[in-house]
Image: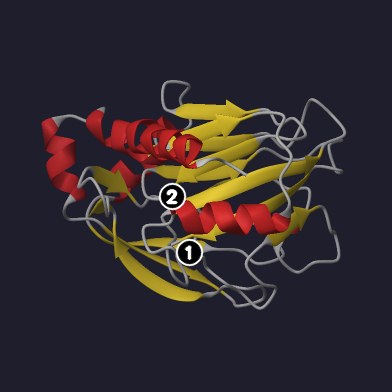
């Protein structure tokens, strides 16, 4: 577990960059819960029917595509429930150095890359996301594409991708504003200047600002032993 000084350094790094990585650490579930509560603005974690810690590993029989070997399109956590401030990932196992890389997109920088006309057009766009409740989330939501970060007030984008899977697809519909601009943002999000691809090692601890960043993953390929503990800090 981190000392108070180390926790302050973690918070400082998250406030500055929105992402924190430390490699080759050894954490128990209880220590991850304590870490999540320590960095949470509300000193609270999201809790589901499975508890505060989700064990994310390949499970073909699971109805949720997150546990399949498929790629996971870009999204933010909690869209259909309650949006956490931070997500903590702790890699507990890996069996290949290729496959299952996590993808992170800084939407504040994505917004800043647009011209003045496009930034103005963003204010008009509203999106609808819907999915059947087959897992621990589901339903239908309507959100403005352009939003403000809960802590620093910077502009962020809620431009999650459609999930095209047989298991629990997520549909996206443009309710108002430019559908073409949404498609452009989908493409820009995958450009190297906006996308960070993280190749995991066992013992990696990665914390990401869930307001600023979208995240997803590449298909697992042969890396089916890839597994994590995940904690969501409110």
The answer to which image quadrant residue 222 occupies is top right
Q: Which residue is mark 1?
A: 78
Residue drawn at 87 percent across, 34 percent down: 95
What residue is rendered at 65% in x and 67% in y? 168
Quarter of the image where the C terminus is located: bottom left
- Determine whether, in the image, residue 9 is placed left or right of residue 120: right
Q: Residues within 10 Å of mark 1 (few under 14, many from 20)?
A: some
Left or right of 178, for residue 129:
right
**Depth check: 56 or 202 in front?**
202
Q: Are marks 1 and 2 in contact (CB under 8 Å)?
A: yes
Q: Earlier in the sequence, mark 1 or mark 2?
A: 1
Residue corresponding to mark 2 = 210
- Horizontally, is 20 left or right of 226 in the view? left
Q: Position of residue 116 (x, y in %)?
A: 12, 33
* Residue sitting nearer the eye, 184 or 144: 144
Quarter-wise, where is residue 150 in the image?
Answer: bottom left
Q: Nearer the viewer, residue 104 or 174?
A: 104
Count of numbered circles on the image: 2
């Amino acid at each position: 577990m981190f000392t108070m000084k180390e926790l302050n350094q973690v918070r400082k790094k998250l406030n500055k960059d929105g992402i924190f990585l430390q490699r080759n650490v050894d954490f128990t579930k209880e220590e991850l819960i304590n870490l999540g509560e320590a960095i949470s603005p509300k000193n609270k974690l999201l809790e589901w029917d499975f508890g505060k810690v989700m064990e994310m590993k390949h499970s073909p029989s699971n109805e949720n595509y997150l546990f399949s070997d498929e790629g996971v399109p870009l999204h933010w956590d909690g869209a259909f429930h309650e949006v956490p401030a931070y997500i903590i990932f702790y890699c507990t196992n890996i069996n290949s150095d290729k496959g299952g890389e996590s993808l992170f997109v800084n939407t504040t920088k994505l917004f800043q890359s647009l011209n003045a006309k496009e930034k103005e057009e963003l204010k008009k766009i509203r999106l609808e996301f819907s999915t059947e409740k087959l897992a621990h989330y589901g339903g239908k939501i309507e959100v403005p594409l352009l939003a403000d970060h809960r802590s620093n007030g910077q502009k962020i984008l809620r431009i999650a991708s459609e999930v095209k899977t047989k298991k629990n697809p997520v549909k996206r519909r443009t309710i108002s504003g430019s559908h073409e601009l949404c498609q452009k943002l989908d493409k820009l999000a995958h450009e190297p200047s906006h996308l960070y691809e993280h190749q995991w090692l066992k013992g990696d601890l990665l914390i990401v600002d869930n307001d600023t960043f979208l995240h997803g993953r590449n298909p697992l390929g042969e890396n089916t032993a890839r597994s994590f503990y995940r904690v969501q800090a409110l």
